[in-house]
Amino acid sequence: MTELTIPTDADQQQASRLVREHVEVGDLVRVTELERTGSDDPELTAEVTAVEPGHLELDGEGADGRGFRYDEIHTLTRVESESKPDSGPN
């Protein structure tokens, strides 16, 4: 597993760049949300289906579904799996 913590002071462009450097479409990731009032489940594991300028698309859904806006992500972890093992640093 490799983990990325997005700095709280990162703007959308910086966060997008960090995410693009960390994950690729098809990766299985675990996303931990920034603490927010009313968040029922602060963590989600899903497949990256797109890395968009404003959000990370997961399982084919954008920020209105299972995806996350970059300002909602605290930690993004690439998870090892049998279907796509973590290949380590490129």
Image (tube, rainbow, N blue to C red):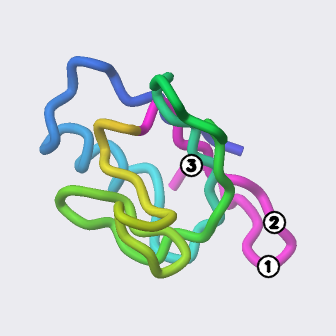
Mark 1 secondary-structure assignment: loop
Q: Please report the residue visible at 44 percent of the width from the left and 50 percent of the height from the top.
A: 22
- State which mark lies toward you, 1 or 3: 1
Mark 3 secondary-structure assignment: loop
Dot 2 or dot 3: first in sequence order is 2
Mark 2 to mark 3: distance in Å? 16 Å
Q: Residue furthest front?
A: 38
Dot 1 or dot 3: first in sequence order is 1
Q: Quadrant of residue 79?
A: bottom right
Magenta stretch prevailing secondary structure? loop
Mark 2 secondary-structure assignment: loop
Label 1: few (<14), some or many (≥20) within 10 Å?
few
Where is mark 2, residue-wise?
Answer: 81
Q: Is residue 2 magenta?
A: no
Q: Is residue 79 above or below residue 9?
A: below
Magenta segment:
73-90
**Residue 63 position in % (x across, y down):** 35, 61
**Residue 33 position in % (x across, y down):** 51, 35
The three-letter code of the residue at mark 3 reads Pro
Mark 1 to mark 3: distance in Å? 18 Å
Q: Is residue 15 above or below residue 34?
A: below
The three-letter code of the residue at mark 2 reads Ser
Asked whether 36 or 85 is in front, the reply is 36
- Residue 89, numbered circle: 3
In the rendered image, the quadrant that contains the N terminus is top right
- Residue 83, numbered circle: 1
Q: Are marks 1 and 3 in contact (CB under 8 Å)?
A: no
